[in-house]
Image: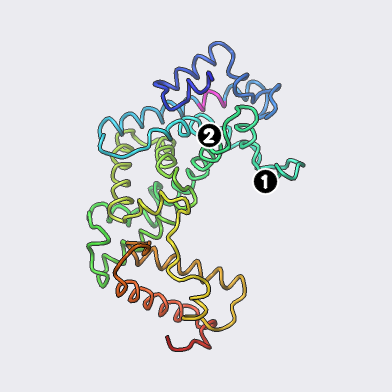
Amino acid sequence: KSIDEMLGTRARDPCRGIQLLMATNLIDVVFPLGDDGEYNCGNNDDAAILYNVGLEYLSRTQSLVTRIFVSSPELEWDIGKRRFLWYAAFLKPVYELMPAGGDSNKKRKQESSFYRLLDVSLKRPKVDVQSIESILKGVEPIQKMILEEVNDNTDAIQSAIQSGARLADVSPQSSQWKDLSDQRWRMYSTLKPIGAMWKEALILAFALSRKDIQDCVDKYKDLIILIEDQLQLKSILLEKSNKPTPLLNGSEIRQRALRGHIDGRGFRRVMEAMEEWQIRNIICHDFQGVDDDDERNRTETQLIDYLVTAFPEYASDTMSR
């Protein structure tokens, strides 16, 4: 209960709670990382370093969140998720040091040591543990693909932000549409594995970047507008599946596009290519409930043409549609 009060959704100052635990020498009881802890990350001095670094990360994250949403209250954020962000920020240095697995128990073999720390020692619900790990796993890809200054994608991101153009409003025949389509696929590929925790991972990535905090605030707002409005990825990234509904199912692909023999590996390649095509080309990614049959038929025809061109080895027996 006490840890929920310190790092929970309603906590006003999570840093103060951690400082209190450290001042009263209870931190290693709540977060057992030292010599006597089940999840040994070194001796007690090493654990103390982790606690202090974690507190620094938490403090910067807390300050960044406050600055972002005080200066821009119009930005949407599910406040119920912030407890996951507090845990992820404080435990980031622990996460980096813990081994990926190695437990002999078959049921737990695929669980990381970090997962078991949260699940067993801190008694976090499994849904909470998965959310916290999703944030932490997402930080490095975001830093590499979106935030790094020296990056092939940096100029493209900045150009898209400065243009203010929305993919839905740009002609598909224009070079700007191609640039935005490329950017949509890159962003989707980076954020899709994180799922619904992508905003929290983005905030933590900024907090750990050591950039000027006001610069982080400004860039966060720019990226949210780019991702949600200009590239229109909001609805996809909030869905449980985190990907568009396939426009063609397996039997339709075989009947209407690729009539040759496709093994399991080849079919996965086809499905991945179709997913990328849909992200790049379809703004309204789910046609369920759409009354315009002509629009759907045109889009399906374009997709079939693409698959036949992209996978000629599987299209040798393609029959007329």
| Labelled disc at residue 92 | 2
Callout in the foreground (2, 1): 1
Which span of residues is magenta-colored? Answer: 50-54
Locate residue 40, reporting x and y percent.
68, 29
In this picture, residue 257 sits left or right of residue 158: right
Number of marks in the image?
2
Q: Height in image: 3 above or below 156?
A: above
What residue lies at 30% left-to-right and 67% top-to-bottom? Answer: 291
Amino acid type for the residue under numbered disc 2: Lys
Locate residue 228, reporting x and y percent.
32, 50
| Labelled disc at residue 110 | 1
Mark positioned earlier in the residue sequence (2 or 1): 2
Locate residue 87, reporting x and y percent.
50, 30
Dot 2 crowding, Cα within 10 Å, few <14, some 14–19, many 20+: many
Q: Is 144 or 139 nearer to us in this picture?
A: 139
Q: Is residue 136 magenta?
A: no
What residue lies at 42% left-to-right and 22% top-to-bottom? Answer: 11
Q: Height in image: 134 above or below 237?
A: above
Q: Is 34 or 197 nearer to us in this picture?
A: 197
Q: Is 277 or 44 nearer to us in this picture?
A: 277
Disc 2 + disc 1, Cβ < 8 Å: no
Amino acid type for the residue under numbered disc 1: Gln
Q: Quadrant of residue 130?
A: top right
Q: Quadrant of residue 187?
A: bottom left
